[in-house]
Image (tube, grey):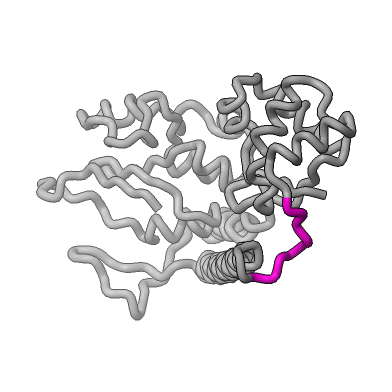
């Protein structure tokens, strides 16, 4: 979560402590730790693009127009300028960035159809029903959490707390799955590297060749192709001549761009020549290198 609190630490009149930790509140509502700006008067503002992305809105501008009145949204430069503050540094903070305040965030949550938002919506509904029935709604003081200086710490509502726990558990599972996937990827890379080392060792003198290699030199190979009328034009011959030295040694590993640079042919024409050589049986492709270069060998 990226957070910026623009209230000076020596502010003579400290803002009133939030009854519920704003980070937990927003996490319960959106399922994510969203960037936040807190103004000196205690109001919180959130990048609309962050909120909309986590709530599943595909078009933030439309979501704002549909769900958030103008008094609950504004541009970053306007919000900071109203408190004589500068725009936060960093490319992620733009002057024309749309922000929503806490009321605007809640309106976006209420318009969201994701299941993760349901516990938060249910709690908001309960708050409204309680106020209508009893005339007020209050939070229980926290029995464990230490009270902030000069204030009272309140317990997070149970439904909000339950939602936070579920979301944190889901995030933990996702992190574990990601770590396992990265471990598998690393293992596959190690196996691939080992197989490549084995193949290279087999191609070296003294190793057992992976395939019987005909003792040819590049000139004889090209002459044999011409006798069989496999290389029919000068540009195909140029590409074949560039590949031949590596082919007789066991395999050619060249990108189209490299062949084009060495032969002076356009990329498209090099690609066509390679297709011709493959089609006529001069070479065959035997996979790719780790960086994506195709590997050509004699058939």
Answer whether residue 173 is visible to the viewer in this image: no
Where residue 21 sits: x, y (%)? 38, 60
Residue at 77% of width from left, 48% of height from top?
298
Asked whether residue 234 is drawn in magenta, I would say: no
Q: Is residue 289 above or below residue 238?
A: below
Q: Is residue 7 above or below residue 199?
A: above
Please identify the quarter of the rendering in which residue 173 is found. bottom right
Please identify the quarter of the rendering in which residue 116 is found. bottom right
Please identify the quarter of the rendering in which residue 244 is found. top right
Q: Report the label total.
A: 0
Residue at 60% of width from left, 63% of height from top?
204
Residue at 23% of width from left, 30% of height from top?
86
Residue at 51% of width from left, 37% of height from top?
49
In magenta, the rendered stretch is 207-215
Q: What predominant SS class does the magenta segment belong to? A: loop
Asked whether residue 208 is drawn in magenta, I would say: yes
Answer whether residue 285 is visible to the viewer in this image: yes
Q: Is residue 231 above or below residue 180?
A: above
Where residue 115 sits: x, y (%)? 68, 56
């Amino acid at each position: 979560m990226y957070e910026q609190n623009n209230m000076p630490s020596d502010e003579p009149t400290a803002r009133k402590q939030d009854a519920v930790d704003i980070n937990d509140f927003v996490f319960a509502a959106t399922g994510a730790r969203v960037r936040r700006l807190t103004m000196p008067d205690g109001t919180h503002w959130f990048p609309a693009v962050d909120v909309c992305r986590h709530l599943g809105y595909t078009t933030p501008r439309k979501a704002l127009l549909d769900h958030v009145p103008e008094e609950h949204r504004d541009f970053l430069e306007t919000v900071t300028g109203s408190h004589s503050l500068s725009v936060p540094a960093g490319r992620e903070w733009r002057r024309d960035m749309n922000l929503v305040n806490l009321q605007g965030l809640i309106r976006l949550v209420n318009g969201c159809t994701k299941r993760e938002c349901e516990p938060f919506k249910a709690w908001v509904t309960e708050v409204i029903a309680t106020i209508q029935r009893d005339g007020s709604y209050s939070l229980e003081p926290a029995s464990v959490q230490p009270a902030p200086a000069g204030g009272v710490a309140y317990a997070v509502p149970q439904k909000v707390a339950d939602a936070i726990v579920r979301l944190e558990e889901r995030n933990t599972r996702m992190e574990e799955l990601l770590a396992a996937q990265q471990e598998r990827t690393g293992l596959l890379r190690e196996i691939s590297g080992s197989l490549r080392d084995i193949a290279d060792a087999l191609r070296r003198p003294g190793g057992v060749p992976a395939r019987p290699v005909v003792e040819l030199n590049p000139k004889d190979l090209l002459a044999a192709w011409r006798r069989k009328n496999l290389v029919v034009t000068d540009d195909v011959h140029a590409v074949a001549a560039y590949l031949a030295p590596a082919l007789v040694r066991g395999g050619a590993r060249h990108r189209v761009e490299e062949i084009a640079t060495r032969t002076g042919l356009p990329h498209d024409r090099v690609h066509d020549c390679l297709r011709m050589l493959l089609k006529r049986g001069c070479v065959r492709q035997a996979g790719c290198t780790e960086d994506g270069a195709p590997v050509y060998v004699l058939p």
